[in-house]
Image (cartoon, helix red, strand yellow):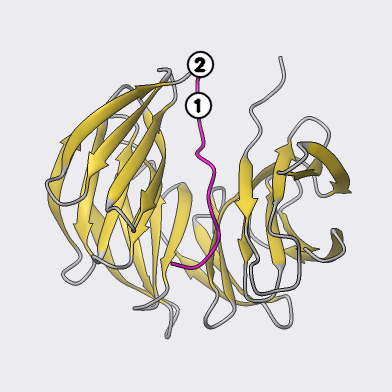
Amino acid sequence: MAKKAKKINVNFSDSGASNDQLYVIDENNNVISVVNATTNNVVSTIPVGHQPVSLNGNPNNNRIYVTNGGSQTVSVIDGATNTVIAIIPVGIQPAGVGINPYINRIYISNRGSNTVSVIDGLTNTVISTISVETYPTDINVHPYINRIYVTNEFRNTVSVIDGLTNTVISTISVESQPSGIGINSATNRIYISNRGSNTVSVIDAITNTVMAIIPVGNQPTSIEVNSSNNQIYVTHEVENTISVIDGLTNIVVATVPVTSPMANIDEDLSLE
């Protein structure tokens, strides 16, 4: 059976690249398929490392970063030419990719080494390695306050990293098996999907404390935030549903059925 692909909508509106390219991970063949979102045709296939896990893009320099879990590297793709321009060694079992486009820093969660690699987007080199807790899975960046959030799945915590000093400044206890991270930069709220407890933890980014715990469906995984309407969308690994949370009330306002199980939500990489 084929593994699930992770699809990300990369919108480079100011970079000179096309605005309608989708980058899709093909884990079975170790490639990234580039799909024209207007015609739904594959326009390019890019070989990357062994067992690609996740990807993310920087709209300021038209670069896409792919974690290769089996080869302990990050592939850097030029979005203008759809070619790999650098391969960066990182930690063991790299997984999540977080980006601060304002300072051109890329953050990689390494599940096997319990670290975060900090990459300089200009030189494509690792400039710092930060120790976190056990099995860091997802990683996301609040660019306005220069904070990086990492879910430590086997310790039920979230590490908060200061992007200026590259040090952990807080470790926040959440619920069982934290997985995905969503951020609303406008409201300074961080949303954590807890796969083992079927909940979402809401963190105040100013105080680094949990301010609400929201029951959702079975095994929540990916989580995304629409800052324009202050709604949060959560997929469930073993249910064909998406939970929709109102960010003002912290209440699930809708449960949307989908046609097949979902592990990931498309991510619009345009800046908020």
86 left or right of 121 in image? right
Residue 233 visible from this viewpoint: yes
How many neighbours does mark 1 have within 10 angstroms: few (below 14), some (14-19), or many (20 or more)?
Answer: many
Residue sitting at x 29%, y 68%: 186
Q: Amino acid at mark 1?
A: Met
Q: Is residue 142 above or below residue 203?
A: below
Please identify the quadrant where the C terminus is shown.
bottom left
Give the spatial CA distance, label 1 vs label 2.
Answer: 9 Å
Q: Secondary structure at mark 2?
A: loop
Q: Which residue is mark 1?
A: 262
1 or 2: mark nearer the eye = 2
Q: Quadrant of residue 199?
A: top left
Q: Secondary structure at mark 1?
A: loop
Checking the image for residue 26, the label placed there is: none
Q: Amino acid at mark 2?
A: Thr
Residue sitting at x 69%, y 75%: 61
Q: Which residue is mark 2?
A: 259
Is 266 in the magenta?
A: yes
89 left or right of 139 in image? right
Is 229 in the magenta?
A: no
Q: Is residue 141 above or below residue 24?
A: below
Pointers 1 and 2 in contact (C-beta within 8 Å): no
Q: Quadrant of residue 125?
A: bottom right
Region of the chain picked out in magenta, as a range? 261-272
Main secondary-structure element of the magenta-colored stretch: loop
Q: Quadrant of residue 65?
A: bottom right
Q: Nearer the viewer, residue 40 or 247?
A: 40
Q: Position of residue 86 (x, y in %)?
A: 82, 67
Residue sitting at x 50%, y 26%: 262
269 left or right of 168 in image? right
Please identify the quadrant where the N terminus is shown.
top right
Q: Position of residue 74 (x, y in %)?
A: 72, 59
